[in-house]
Amino acid sequence: MNLMTSSSPHVHGGDSVDKVMMTVIYALAPATFLSIFLFGWPALLVILLTVGSCVATERWTNHLRKRPSTIGDNSAILTGLLLALTLPPHSPWWICVVGGVFAIGVGKSIYGGLGFNMFNPALIARVFLLISFPVELTTWPEISPIFQEGSFSLAQSFSIIFAGDYGAISLDAITAATPLGQYKVETGMGKTVAEALGGDYGYSIFHTFAGDIGGSLGETSALFLLAGGVWMIQRGLITWHIPISMILGTLIPATLMWLINGDLYPDPVFHLITGGLILGAFFMATDMVTSPVTTKGMLIFGASCGILTYVIRTWGGYPEGVSFAIVIMNTAVPLIDQYTKPVVYGKSKKEKANA
Amino acid sequence: MGILQQVIRAFHGGVHPDENKDLTAACGIESMPMPAKLYVPLHQHIGRPCDPAVGIGDKVLKGQIIGKPDGFISAPVHAPTSGTITDFVEHPVGHPSGLPMLCAVLETDGEDTQIEGLKGVEDPFSLEPAQIRDAVREAGIVGLGGATFPSHVKLSPPGEKVVELLVLNGVECEPYLTCDARLMEERTEQIVQGIQIMLHALQTKQAVIGIEDNKPAAIAAMKRAVDGEKNITVQVLPVMYPQGSEKQLIEVLTGRQVPSGGLPIDVGVVCHNVATAIAIKEAVVNGQPLTKRVVTVTGRGVVRPANVECLLGTTVEDLLQQCGGTKPSMTKLVMGGPMMGVALHSPKAPVVKGTSGLLVLEKQETTDSPEGPCIRCAKCVHVCPMSLMPNEMAWLSKNEQMDALAEHDLFDCIECGTCSYVCPSSIPLVHYFRYGKFAIEGKKRAKHRSDLAKVRTEVKEKRVAKEKAEREAKKAAMKAKREAAAKAKAEAAAKEGAAPADAATEAPAGDDKAAKIAKAKAAAAAARAAKAKKAGGAEDAPADDDKAAKIAKAKAAAAKAREAKKAREAAAAGETAPAEEAPADSVADEKAAKIAKARAAAAKAKAAKAAREAKKAQEDAGE
């Protein structure tokens, strides 16, 4: 009789890394489809380019490291998708490819692959691109829903992404500042919040929340991202600790400052629905590899990310601070884990401190 | 109700695996025909293995002791039925190492004759608690939930500890298993009697039976049974693994946590399995030692899943036979539950006291994914019932960072398997913890040995130095004496009749004293050294004696084999006369073997005693 032997337990819950990654991808699907719909064919091309370059880089680095292929764990696909969602919808092809190669190559593989990286690969790539190519990364086209009159055709999309050629349309005619950018620039010039966002700009809570405004692919629909995030919590994939503490970390200082001076500081709802706070809180900061494993650590990490986001948005040099905040906090994760170890069953806190 | 409180938030972590109890939940306990051969391991509990108490060729009766316990944390092994002990062999058992263990081979005679002198008492409450404990010990009862801790130890709380509550574990949180549930349905009265006996032995007033709510029939039966008993309650618990773990169950029922490194008694609780309660009742009231148990034979790889009451020592093969055999799709045999059970290397392994289940698993029921990298998903941290950090512990164990691993409370791990169960990367976390525990224990032993060697060397160096000092002191004294004498002589010669010099008489006296002190000190040092040496040397002694015992055994076995061969040849030749002689020979040989065996056992006992004394001496020396 040929018996299989192994250490207990002999049954398994059935979770696997590829399923975990796929679940996150499913959670992102509504927001992704919405952004493709809103920004048209160029958005689809951007997503395909980043995902493609991430997967190719994963395979290539596997080859260099003489390791079996790890494409099957779906993490490269997810990184590509997340990276795409942080990019402007008309990003040139080389931005997408450089970003994808950087995310997997520098963000992950040189650390030893999945599980060993210090930074969220998609975010570190975005930060790299934002610092290196600020113009390309802050050119925000207005929405131009697919299959509608006047929207870009597939052929036009190819020439936009691959040649930067908009044909007869002038670039200025189709770009606009995002609410955060508008607020930053205009209040910097001495205007009040209401003046900056009202008037010609016409900021609307409803449109911003629903997503039909300009911005990076994944920033636009707070609603769909929120739905995806809640679904992930329901599935037990992530816990509420990081997203909620991060959102509160931004909203609490935002509320305080708004109460102190509503002319200079926008209201908390503005902070919640603009920019990438919801994308960051539910999908970026919760990246398992680069976030704490303890419950207490998660709360500290999330809250710190939130506060840093607010600080960078309000007083920093960039209009948006989510990616910087998360990348900065990623470096503190080992320390946070070290100091937030749970109290072991049967040991009092005092004993633990003395040990 | 004092200590007992229904705790809303149960315990930290936990999981809820597929229960799979429906395979056998409705299967009443059945018995099986007597197997032709039983393999009874001499080590069936946590603690020290038993010594053989019978020789090869001995006829034994049901209930006769065949393994003598060694020490307090030990329990005897009894013959499960009557028959002949044909051999002592190293036989496959349910142990993760796959190493065989010493088993007595019992060829059953089918008579099932009980040994005389086993008698119970009609009124167990007339007994002193100590008498009940003795009865339990003599019956060889150990925890039947799987941990196999000798039950009499749990019934002997140290004098200064007060037992406030007796917890009966009817949780049966392991998936697949239903033997405890069936016992609670079918042998309700015996359980209640057992509980009352235990309460009497512990001098405790209150008992609670914890049962998970996926066993409605067992709950109903137990509730009916304790209806008239004021001191026993049934507590229905939500289903959550590992709630059947003693520590978790106590926390759920009382809100108290057993201190790390402590025992339930430290929080005023004693915990026994419901099946153990039956065994205790059988032992005290009927005088029956523990020789059988109920095993759930289940899984999708067995033809007819069932709950079978079988004799200890029944091989898995025989047990499977009773259940219609296995399907070709079977890939894994597990003794115990799927979360903590042991994968068997051989179907020849016997049922032991701790065997609660036999799982016959198909490929799709079990796991076999390759280990992936940890993605720090934190699931293991969230589900760990002991609030450990399995991810970090596995990392440390893998990288041989044993000191850091011990600091991560590795020894608080109960190896429940919850972390491995949820791990999306299929990391065999429990396996790493077992490895880490073993490595750390090994390191400790090695350090202990090297410390002893160090002490020995130091003592020797001191002794040598003392002896040297002593010699020199003696020399100096002699010299002083000689000089004094010479001086005195000279003086006497110079001044005849003059008073002797003061210096001359005083000097030798002072030196003598110094020499005496030095000598005494040296003697003391030597005594210490001898003690230490004895302690150190004795460590090897048991090993040697063990070897001797093994060799003696092997010789005995060889003699037996020779005799058997002779007998076979004789039979083949059809010669009657030599055949008549052969038994005589064989009797002699057998006798020799028996003697060798007994001698071996005696040598072993001696060695064990020496080791114990040495250990004591060593502790003394260490002070």
Image (cartoon, rainbow, N blue to C red):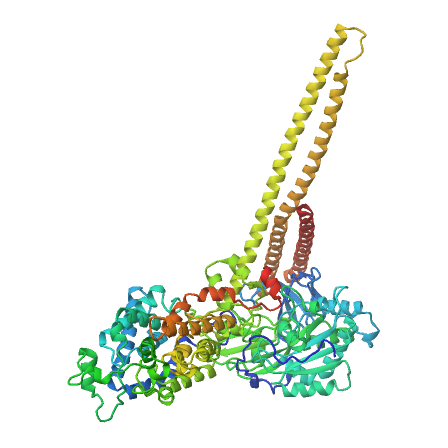
The total number of labels drawn is 0
Does the rendering let one see residue A188? yes
Residue A64 occupies which quadrant of the picture? bottom left
B329 or B259: nearer the viewer: B259
Q: Quadrant of the N terminus of chain B?
A: bottom right
Picture layout, residue B97 above or below residue B216: above
Does the rendering let one see residue B575? no
Picture layout, residue B38 above or below residue B191: above
> Where does the image place residue A62, in percent across and percent down from the top left?
31, 67
A58 with respect to B47 (left or right) = left
Picture layout, residue B509 above or below residue B227: above
Q: Residue at x 45, y 84 (%)?
A: A230
B437 or A59: nearer the viewer: A59
A39 with respect to B99 (left or right) = left
> Where does the image place residue A17, in percent across and percent down from the top left?
41, 75
Q: Residue furthest bottom?
A: A149
Q: Residue furthest front?
A: A190
A12 with respect to B479 (left or right) = left
A254 with respect to B478 (left or right) = left
Residue A118 occupies which quadrant of the picture? bottom left
> Where does the image place residue B326, in percent across and percent down from the top left?
51, 80
A208 or B595: nearer the viewer: A208
> Where does the image place residue B393, in percent across and percent down from the top left?
50, 64
A292 or B566: nearer the viewer: A292
